[in-house]
Image (cartoon, helix red, strand yellow):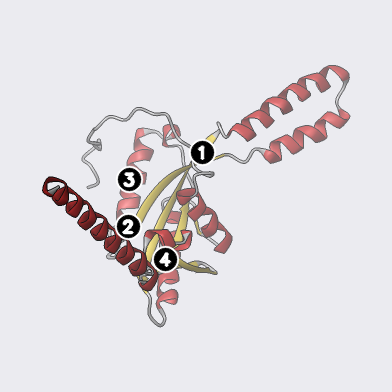
Amino acid sequence: MESLLFPLLMLAVTFLGGGILLFYLKHSKKSKPPEEGSIALQTAQQFINVKDIQDRFLYTRDALVFVYLRIHAISIDLYSNSEKTILIKTLTAELSDIQYPFKFMALSRPVDISPLIVEMSEMLKEAEDKRKEILRQEILQMSGFALSGEIVERQFYLALWEKQEEGCERELEKRALLLVEKFAAAGIASDLLSQKEIVRLVNLVHNPAYIHLEDTETTASIPLLKGGGMA
């Protein structure tokens, strides 16, 4: 009898301790409100640190203001060696007095080929029988490219920012317009993004539906400039 008393006593103590622990955990969860910054309560806007987008400016939750420039691409493969050297020296001279930080971004996005499809559809109405069949095949192929997102282009952006305070928007816009002039002096077109374009850029960076995954192989290398560098 005594040999059974000790195991029964230990079992009772175990059940009692487990019941007290469950009671404590249950009531502690009810009494303790969830923290505002917890991952479960984070919205998409909080996750990407965007507070608001107004006009040409993006406001972040950590009190920064951003403005963005689109740098239109050029094909330096069409340039001669002397033209490349001139471009390097001109850009170096124009940007050498920049004393504030900026971020350069190169992103891939599907090319909008809908205007080409519309134009071919208009041609289809007036085309002869043989040309109609060719145009139909081309339209079907182009539509497939548009839906698959296989045709992509590289887009280039510069981001400038400043701590949010009175008058910072005017200073940021002044810097951005000055950069537009500097790139124009080197023959490179650029412009400030509008509100809708900033929203599109944020989607391009953070929204998986906009992202195009490039299957490319990369190797570590150090770029070298010919002709004495940038001197």
Q: CA distance from mark 4 to mark 3?
A: 27 Å
Say which element carries label 3.
helix
Residue 203, placed above or below residue 110: below
Residue that label 2 marks: 95
Residue that label 1 marks: 153
Name the disc covering residue 88, or none: 3
Q: CA distance from mark 3 to mark 1?
A: 23 Å
**Relative to the observer, which residue lies in front, 190 or 212?**
212
Outermost residue, top side: 130
Left or right position of 115 against 3: right
Q: Position of residue 133 (x, y in %)?
A: 81, 19
Q: Residue 25: tell me if it is visible.
A: yes
Q: Position of residue 176 (x, y in %)?
A: 43, 65
Name the kind of residue labelled 3 in the image.
Answer: Ile
Q: CA distance from mark 2 to mark 3?
A: 11 Å
Residue 29, placed above or below residue 169: above
Name the disc covering residue 66, or none: 4
Q: CA distance from mark 2 to mark 1?
A: 26 Å
The mark lying in front, picked from 2 and 1, is: 1
Say which element carries label 4.
strand
Quarter location, residue 220 = top left
Name the kind of residue labelled 2 in the image.
Answer: Leu
Mark 1 Cα shell of 10 Å, populated few (<14), some (14-19), many (≥20): few
Say which element carries label 1.
strand
Mark 3 Cα shell of 10 Å, populated few (<14), some (14-19), many (≥20): some
